[in-house]
Image (cartoon, rainbow, N blue to C red):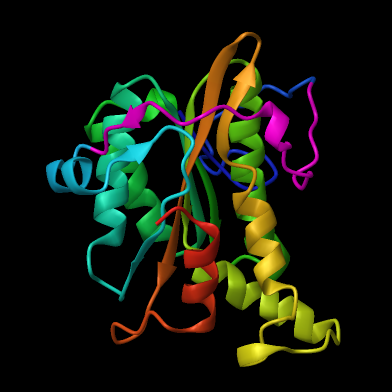
Amino acid sequence: GKVINPFGTALDNNSIIKKSKVSRAVEVLPSGIMTRKTIKRQLDTGVAIVDLMVPIGYGQRELVIGDRKTGKTNFLLQTVVSASKSGNICIYAAIGKKKMDIKKAEEYFKNNGVMESVIIVASSSQDPAGVIFVTPYSAMTIGEFFRDQGQDSLVILDDLSTHAKFHREISLLANKFPGRNSYPSDMFYTHAKLLERAGNFAVKDKEASITCIPVVESSGGDISGYLQTNTMAMTDG
């Protein structure tokens, strides 16, 4: 029910968050194959054509790709509402977004009555590059916290194109050797390690999943770019 920055501080001045007794590293090694279970349950997105044609399973990593202003965020907001009503905890990572867009997402969830089971982890375009870079890691860490309680969660990373741009900025300032498109040579590893933390896991004699929907922006319908092909390779479709 809160909008927080990647460090867990409420962005709404009226909100008070009690200090947690639990601390977690935002970047950890993904759990191995022995901790994972076969994906058998379907997550309803609330969009009939998607649920019929390309059903998403609990614990899958499903890529949303498209040009600017093609309705990616609208689809994601609708998915959050549907998943929340199905009993999932939804973590929406707004990576380097405009403050107006973050506010719109919050109001959409409130208007649909699901904000109590939604956490928005937000960094605005005015934040330092390091804060924007750590945003998706924080969101995934919160998802892992709920997974360990035996609770299914949905993590939306909106979007990894922005994340990659700030990773490139930090790397070039640190004099890292640039690779393709001036992105650092570990760009694929950075995102693959992040997305590998999602999955369907065996927790306390039951299943608990982290379903991850990363978003990548294309330009002029071109999906053959470096970031686009990277994320296709590390997601389920």
Q: How many numbered circles are shown?
A: 0
Looking at the rendering, which quadrant does residue 143 occupy?
top right
Q: Is residue 44 magenta?
A: yes
Expressed as whole percent of the image width and height from the top left, the position of residue 188 reads 66, 70
Q: Name the magenta segment's main secondary structure.
A: loop
Image quarter of the N terminus: top left
Expressed as whole percent of the image width and height from the top left, the position of residue 93 reads 51, 49
**Magenta stretch?**
22-45
Expressed as whole percent of the image width and height from the top left, the position of residue 183 reads 66, 83
Looking at the rendering, which quadrant does residue 98 occupy?
bottom left
Name the one closer to the observer, 120 or 161. Answer: 161
Residue depicted at x 54% and y 22%: 208
Residue depicted at x 38% and y 79%: 223
Name the one closer to the observer, 26 or 10. Answer: 26
Tell me: 132 left or right of 41: right
Residue 225's place in the image compared with 190, above or below, is below
Expressed as whole percent of the image width and height from the top left, the position of residue 94 reads 48, 54
Residue depicted at x 33% and y 32%: 43
Tell me: 1 left or right of 67: right
Residue positioned most to the left: 48
Residue positioned most to the top: 205
